[in-house]
Amino acid sequence: MVGRRKDKKKKMDTGKLDAIVKKVHTDVNDRQKGYREQSLKIHPWVCGRCGKTFTRENLQLLTVHHIDHNHNNNPPDGSNWENLCIYCHDNEHQKMNEYEAYGDVNAGSQSETATHNPFADLKSIINKDEKED
């Protein structure tokens, strides 16, 4: 084995790595506490999607969603925040993941809104019932 040198494996400083990871987690938690507390003061304790109302007993199930999906965009007026229950929040992020993976699935559709109106003839039905009485 002439000309080949033995590489010494460098030992990773796990203490330094652990300190970095701990600091990142602490920073994230501090940032989340800050905007979460602000959002709970500014916005009602209601899910912005399903309308479920929250109390102090179940407030931990209400999350703060960043509308533009940028967790560093935290304006003090709360304009980038939306309170969502954990289920609607998960659904919102799932939609974003699907959009990133597959693109806009509604892009080729002719109409994005419903065209059927089940109450279109309601007034004539009510008038007909009133005349029969």
Image (cartoon, rainbow, N blue to C red):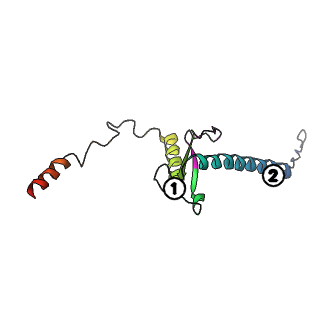
**In the picture provided, is 32 more to the left or to the right than 117?**
right
**Disc 2: which residue:** 18
Taking depth in this image into account, of 114 and 99 the one nearest to the observer is: 114
Q: Is residue 38 above or below residue 130?
A: above
Badge 2 local density, few (<14 within 10 Å), some, or many (20+)? Answer: few
Taking depth in this image into account, of 90 and 66 the one nearest to the observer is: 66
Which SS class for mark 2? helix
**For the residues marked 2 and 1, what is the alpha-carbon distance in whole angstroms?**
32 Å
Identity of the residue furthest to the left in this view: 132
Of callouts 2 and 1, the N-terminal one? 2
Question: What's the magenta region?
Answer: 64-78
Residue at image point 85% right, 48% down? 16
**In the picture provided, is 42 more to the left or to the right than 19?**
left
Q: Are marks 2 and 1 in contact (CB under 8 Å)?
A: no
The amino acid type of the residue labelled 1 equals: Tyr
Taking depth in this image into account, of 113 and 100 the one nearest to the observer is: 113
Task: Please tell me whether mark 2 or mark 1 is closer to you in this view.
Answer: 1
Residue at image point 68% right, 50% down? 33
The quarter of the rendered structure image containing the N terminus is top right
